[in-house]
Image (tube, coloured by chain):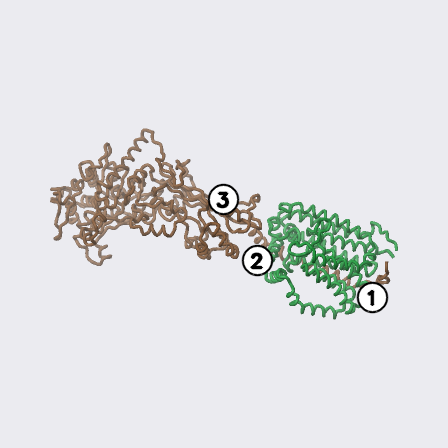
Chain colours: A green, B brown
Amino acid sequence: MKDAPGTRDYDWWLVAILAAICALGVIEIYSATHGSALVGMHTKQIRWLVVGVVLMFALSRVDYHLIMDQAPVLYIIGIVALLAVLLVGHTRFGAKRWIPILGEFLQVSELVKLIIIIVLARFFAEVRTDELSLQDLIKAGLIVGLPLALILKQPDLGTALVLMPMLVVGAFLAGLQWKHAAAIVLIGVMMLPVGWHFMKPYQKERVTSFLHPEEDAKGSGYQVLQSKIAVGSGGFWGKGFGNGSQNQLGYIPVRYSDFIMSAWAEEQGFKGVLLALGLYMALLLRLVQNAQRAKDRAGMFLVMGVAAALGFHVLVNVAMVIGAMPVTGIPLPLMSYGGSATLFVFLAIGLVMNVRLRRFVN
Amino acid sequence: MSYWFRNDNRLPQVRLAAASYVIVGMITLLLLGFWKLQVIDADKYGQLAERNRVRSIPIIAPRGRMLDRDGRVLVDNYPSFSVLLLRDDAAAVEKNLPAIADGLGLSLDDLKEQLNNTEKLPKFQPIVIKPEATPADVAFIESHRADIPLLEMLMVHRRRYLPGGFMSHASGYVGEVSEQQIEASNGKLRPGDFAGKSGLERQYNDLLVGTDGMRRVVVNSVGKEMKEMRLTQQEAIPGKQIQLTIDYDLQDVAEKAMEGKKGAIVALDPRTGEVLAFVSRPAPDPNDFAIRVSKEEWQRLNEDEDHPLMNRVTQAQLAPGSVFKIVMATAMLETKVPPENFTAYCPGYANFYGRMFKCHIYGKGGHGEVGIHSAIVHSCDVFFYNVGMRLGIDRISKYAKMLGLGSKTGIDLPSEEPGLVPSEEWVQRVFHHKWYPGSTISVAIGQGAVTATPLQLAYMVGGVASGGIFKQPHLLKDAPNVGEVRVDLAEDTVEQVTQGMYGVVNEGGTGGAVKLQGIEFCGKSGSAQVMSNNERSKLGKSLSQNKDNAWFVGYAPRRNPEIVVSALVEGGEHGALASGPMARDIVKAYYDKKAKKGQGDYKADYQQHKFANGTPTEVAEEPKAVSKPDQSTAVLAAGLPKKPHAN
């Protein structure tokens, strides 16, 4: 097996799209923080981006088949890490999600997302039938279920939710039968009250305030309202870089991270949103194209797992910013400030590059 | 490497293509969401963002100052801070109210009551919860900007009057507008605004108030003002300064003369109607009302038996006593009833309609045979009883009204009283019976039902001595449209009446004690009974409680006077003794000043007065400021009240 892909084989279009999105992110982080106590955050973000790019290229060099070979080991590592977080993890923002690595706090669940993408891809690649059997579907569900339960325990609803689209997209591509899909949806709906029962009070509050924003003027309903005001007041042309009053005066909650799209939309207007969402669409479509051209099913599942995770991030985050979904704490890939989240995205793209580099080989 | 992935290049191309469509659909839906917010509802959210970041704080326009005729500042302003409560967020107000009450040292119940009272006003209008902030309050507000973002400081201008109630009934006072006034003002007035409540403050309120401006500041999400972000602000337009006819020097003499007494002094220039001095005592200190007057204090002032809130110059309607004899003499000389050479014998009393009427000299002999001149000079009641009986009430009434009694003089002050001139028609209308001829005898010496204000008496005497030219009294200098009433009086009438009043002072008359060297000081005294002797004994009140009111109306020179002073001391007993010297001193001060001015060594300055908070007063930098074009036009538009005394 020849393994010497040249630089020509990298998806430079994908790299260009990523670079553009990162640039928007850095610009808006700068705009959102330059006048505040958080000044300098954009340079930190650039540092994370550099680390991410290095990791991306490094990961692309190791044949993904070799990585997927180690799927069971990775899975065990992931589970152990999640347990470790629960036992000795560092509490930040009221939830145990962080363990210190390299002097920085890293969010373990970001690593677990990556592992689950690999594990699921391996699992579905080994399914030989054209139609996904109920038995295999349940197995896949269990594979995802265990880490999902552990992440929920932290508690981190947002990250836990990200595991679901990976499962759904994987199962769909593995030949999910419509009757099974229908049954799952049905069971899901029936389980909603149970799920509600297990939700933390702050999670319940977020859901209620999403459903009845006017009843919660200062909590998360307030956050969403301020976000909507920011977005709406931006208008078509935007208020201009550094001129968003909602952004600069701190009305937008965590404007440099989860609500960065709100800050961007205020300052750059609908035209800026068009650019940003256009880039995300290009990114996702490019990923699907890479999946279509993958050499084998394993590569295809790997790429689509990444696409599912990123697509879900974009959807949930952006929908939250415009008040179309509850506040979940899911960042916007590569625009939101954050070390762990940024590294996750670059590593995931590293896997995609990996698959792409080997599409003609064999 | 194991080969678990062998021979599996069958990719689900259809389902992958479907995924592409899902992505495009998802992004499209999100874009539609943004389109809705950013294009369709952009204006709405733009306004919400603006309301978030911009806080509007009124800039209070200072009220116009009041200057005396020489440009000395009589009523001024000083800066002060008020605490505003922002009420947009009702829940936050509710939550923080106890902390606010505690921090500012206010009672929580009062604060709640105030909130309830202002419930009907728009929520975006802040309310004043503490009119005068202490340094501790300022510190409290500044240090709690983040956790109690509901308080704001407002720079206001407080009114400052000369201390001790100096000229206070003329200047009047200001007070916070009531909720009813706010509702009636069509949004022009806000809670905490001040408006003139009485006196000139009220009369010329529209001139004195400026137009408040608006300072718009940017606030961040925790309510902190962003000083570096400047917004256009609407500057306040200060109220217009008004110059009064009051002469501080004369006013000061008058104030000192009335110190501790109950009564009034008003000095007019009959040639122009200008009011030179205006004192009513007892007087409240309007500085006490400049912030906020407590309910108890207000009640006390209203219930005070001495009626300190009453403006005695224009509102004390009292029997004019012997001063009324000027009306009688004029009526007699004009109608020739009885003829000019009529004399009466005064043994100290006279009998009419089976009743005895005393002369003021009763018990000390009598005036003997008196004609019109000595009757005025010695104020012989018996002479005027006879004249009154011959004239009859209707002619007396006609002349009293002609000379300005019984109707408002039209001075530019609110709530002037007209006094009363009785007539047959009046008795019929009010008491539904015929006029008793005996009443005419009392009216003839200014007793009975006839009443007049100190201002009316000055106006009347000034008018007669000016040969029948009555100028509308006014306090606003350079006032346009000063009303004038010309009463056709015979030259001989004016000559005889003024000779009489000259005699009062200069020929050993009742006012002999107030003679002035080198000045043609004339006048007429009056000692008016507060109630008749009969009434007095019926009520059983001690005499001291109902001592006669002492009047003296003096003027100089004898013909076409430059100054006329009406002085009233309630319970002063003898007009010539209690009130005469007051009138004399003011006339003397007037001539002294005139002499100094003539020699060129007069300089307008204050005596020893200082404003209430200790800052010395000053001569206004530019007294001519009042005649700036915009101001004079405003004055023109305002003008004087319509003059009710008409010929």
Q: Tell me residue B31's x, y (percent).
A: 67, 57
Establish whether labels 1 and 2 are both on one chain.
yes
Q: Tell me residue B323's x, y (percent).
A: 22, 44
Quickly name the residue at label 1.
A128
Quarter placement of the N terminus of chain B: bottom right
Q: Locate residue A140 relative to residue B384 in the image: left or right.
A: right
Counting residues from the N terminus, which is met first, the one under dot 1 or under dot 2?
A: 1
* Mark 2, secondary structure of its residue: loop
| Residues tagged 2 and 3 counted as in contact (Cβ below 8 A) | no
Name the amino acid type tagged 3: Glu
In which quadrant of the rendered view does residue B480 lie? top left
Residue located at (27% from left, 40% from top): B565
Q: Locate residue A265 relative to residue A57 in the image: left or right.
A: left
Tag shown at residue A225: none
**Mark 1: few, some, or many residues within 10 Å (few <14, many ≥20)?**
few
**Mark 2: few, some, or many residues within 10 Å (few <14, many ≥20)?**
some
The vertical placement of B219 against B7, above or below, is above
Residue situated furthest front in the rendering: A87
Tag shown at residue A217: 2
Choose between A159 and A22: the one closer to the eye: A159
Q: Chain of mark 2?
A: A
Q: Chain of mark 3?
A: B
Quickly name the residue at label 3.
B235
Q: CA distance from mark 3 to mark 1?
A: 81 Å
Name the amino acid type tagged 1: Arg
Q: CA distance from mark 1 to mark 2?
A: 53 Å
Q: Locate residue A119 relative to residue B136 in the image: left or right.
A: right
Q: For the residues carrying marks 3 and 1, which lies nearer the camera in this image?
A: 1
